[in-house]
Amino acid sequence: MKTDTQRPRPGAAILRTALRRNIGAMIAGTVLMGLYQAAETAFPIALGMIVEHTMQDRSLGSLGVSIASLAVIITTVSLSWRFGMRVLQKANTTEAHRWRVQVAACGLQPVARDVDGLKSGEVLTIATEDADQTADIIEVVPLLISSLVAVVVAAVALSLADMRLGLLVVAGTVGILSILAVMSRRIGSSTQEQQARVARAGAKVADLIIGLRPLHGFGGNHAAFGSYREVSTDAKRQAITVARVNGAYAGTALALNAVLAAAVSLTAGWLAFDGQISIGELVMAVGLAQFIMEPLKMFSEMPKYVMIARASAERMALVLSAPSVPAPGSGRPEPGGDLEVDDVHHGTLRGVKFRIGAGEFVAIAPYQPRAAADLAAVLAVNVPPPAYEGAVRLGGRELAELSVAAVREHLLVNPYDAEIFGGTLRTNIDPSGSSRTLPEAVEASMLTDVVALHRDGLDYAVRDRGANLSGGQRQRLSLARALAADTDVLVLHNPTTAVDAVTEQLIARNIAKLRRGRTTLVITSSPALLDAADRVLVLDEGVITAEDTHRNLLASDEAYCLAVAR
């Protein structure tokens, strides 16, 4: 499905986009729902006319025509409602799906976005609840117009009986809408705040799930749950506030509609008593006063839903209009090219400079973990090129000149804390199902014992975040995924910290064998991986201080021995 990627996109523009691309369904829905309201309003009009003519012409023929007329009206009401709502709800559901996909696409794009501090749990709420409520505008507008049709038909019919009745309906409707329009603004602001607080509670839940194991480990779970309880209570209070505002709005709307209906009925009764309208017109007026309450109720509720849709659209705009953190270029690197880091200053990095030729297997031994994380972030383009000094070149071209999507195709940085998704071992290793090296990646990462352990093999079900796998199994699964991608340049950040020494030795040899002829950089303090590399670069205090093979450095550099020896 294609998604609209124009920027910027404020809330009003999102609503206009939703209305524009569903104009056909909305026209059809408006016609059908307008027909429904007109037919429903015509029922008391027809009833009044039947009473009027029956009193003048008491014949079976007139009775038959009257019954047939009522049957046509009732059939029109039933069919127009059924098919009108079917058209509108289909369009509503489809539009909500479009926005969910678009919000998800923003989160999955290779270019990070400045989403103003929103966490994943908040983005999830925006992609679900806010997308649904924004799409409700597709139904709101046709229902608003169709309700207006009912009010207009009733006003015209009553005006034909007596102009004062028609003017009373028009004046009452304007007064009701004026009062409710003021109240609907409060609903919009309150709903927006409620959605924000619910989203924060969702983000807190996501954070707790991620850190549940370490929280249990040092006994911090009770404090964490208390923190969530506080955020959740805050969301509950706001929900109660919104419910009160909605209740006051609904009660006010119902009371005002009832007052208008009573005023029309009493005025019609007074006019009939005074002989200014006939009995048939009195029946019509009383019937319209009762029937008009439903479209008036719907008509008066529409501003509330418009404000809710607008509030949700504004929250979606936080994600959809968020600018890219890096300013991506449009070029593409040469396939199989080398990787060069030229005098990069960022965070703890103080002028890092090195070059890895095409097909080399190089390891970096960082003495400070923070420097390793900063280097990985720069290589992964999680830090935009303008945010650091120096340059990173891939295939001879600076990252600032390249499309981030193209960089991702040629350069993969596998973090030490890579996510494991709910699914199977196979879908975690090869999400697209297109890897040609999946068996080799499983073997190289020493994931074979996990596969052999279960009857389903690679189709063994993995729970969300790998909850049914050990730490070492999750790390090997992540490594298998990185190897199966088979990119030109692969950067591994601490890929074996959770596995035993024997397995680590085997993995190191397997990576060197599988990646032979492909550019590979491992940021690690593992002796096995350092020994498997063609050469080792020592990263100390943000700069490269030494370069040699692992064994030569062990023999000549005492600080290196202390840093990597186990």
Image (cartoon, rainbow, N blue to C red):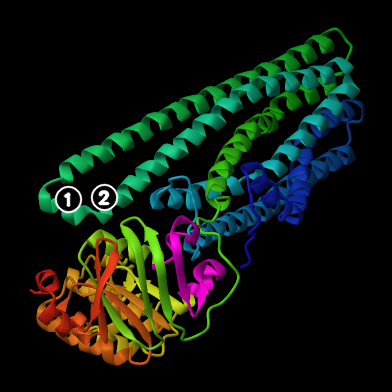
Figure quadrant of the N terminus: bottom right
Binning the other alpha carbons within 10 Å of mark 1 as few (below 14), some (14 to 19) or many (20 upward) gives some
User: Between residues 343 and 214, which one lies in front from this camera angle?
Assistant: 343
**Residue type beneath disc 2:** Leu
Magenta-colored stretch includes residue 391: yes
Q: Which residue is mark 2?
A: 208
SS state under label 1: helix
The residue positioned farthest toward the left in the image shown: 566
Q: Are marks 2 and 1 in contact (CB under 8 Å)?
A: yes
* Residue 565 appears left or right of 142: left
Residue 9 falls left or right of residue 315: right
Give the left or right position of residue 328, taking residue 209 as reference.
right
Q: Assign the C terminus to one quadrant of the image.
A: bottom left
| Quadrant in which residue 416 is drawn | bottom left
Say whether residue 491 is magenta.
no
Give residue 354's position: percent from left, percent from top.
36, 74
Q: Is residue 470 visible?
A: no
Q: Amino acid at mark 1?
A: Leu
Whether residue 246 is visible here, answered yes or no, is: yes
Residue 399: x and y, percent? 50, 69
Secondary structure under tag 2 reads helix
User: What x and y, as percent, mark residue 498?
Assistant: 16, 71
Outermost residue toward the top in this view:
274
Give neighbour class at mark 2: few <14, some 14-19, many 20+ (Cα, 10 Å). Answer: some
Rendered view: 160 above or below 39: above
Vertical side of 109 occupied by 299: above or below: above
Look at the picture and state if 240 lies above or below 380. Answer: above
- Magenta residue span: 379-407
Residue 215's disc is 1
What's the residue at 18%, 68% (across, down)?
A: 471
